Amino acid sequence: MDNKEKDKKQLLLRLSPTLWKELASWAEDDFRSINGQIEYLLTECVRQRKKSNGKHLEDQREESL
């Protein structure tokens, strides 16, 4: 196990049975574990947020000129 794996944090996550089933199905489609799928989805959401926040800041700068 490399350092990156050792540094991962654990958390307890409670999901509804419906959401669990949807995530399990999606994970299977993408050949991931449910944990891997959740981590992937969260990573993508954070990337999108950073992208949109960066764009938002650029728009604000242009408006102030």
Image (tube, grey):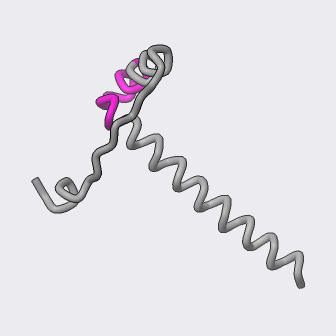
> Is 7 placed above or below 28 here?
below
* Residue at the limit of the structure toward the bottom, as seen here: 65
Query: Could you say which is closer to the camera, residue 9 or residue 53?
Result: 9
**Number of marks present in the image shown:** 0
* On-image quarter of the C terminus: bottom right
Q: Which residue is located at x 58 percent, y 61 percent? A: 50
> Is 62 placed above or below 15 here?
below
Q: Which residue is located at x 34 percent, y 29 percent? A: 34
Q: Which residue is located at x 46 percent, y 40 percent? A: 41
Q: Is residue 59 left or right of residue 55?
A: right
Q: Is residue 18 left or right of residue 27?
A: right
Q: What is the magenta range?
A: 25-36
Q: Which residue is located at x 35 percent, y 22 percent? A: 28
Magenta stretch secondary structure, dominant:
helix
* Residue at the limit of the structure toward the left, as seen here: 1
> Is 31 placed above or below 59 here?
above
Q: Quadrant of residue 15?
A: top left
x, y percent for residue 10: 28, 46
x, y percent for residue 64: 88, 81
Tell me, yes or no, whether the highlighted magenta stretch contains residue 20.
Answer: no
x, y percent for residue 62: 84, 77
Tell me, yes or no, whether the highlighted magenta stretch contains residue 34.
Answer: yes
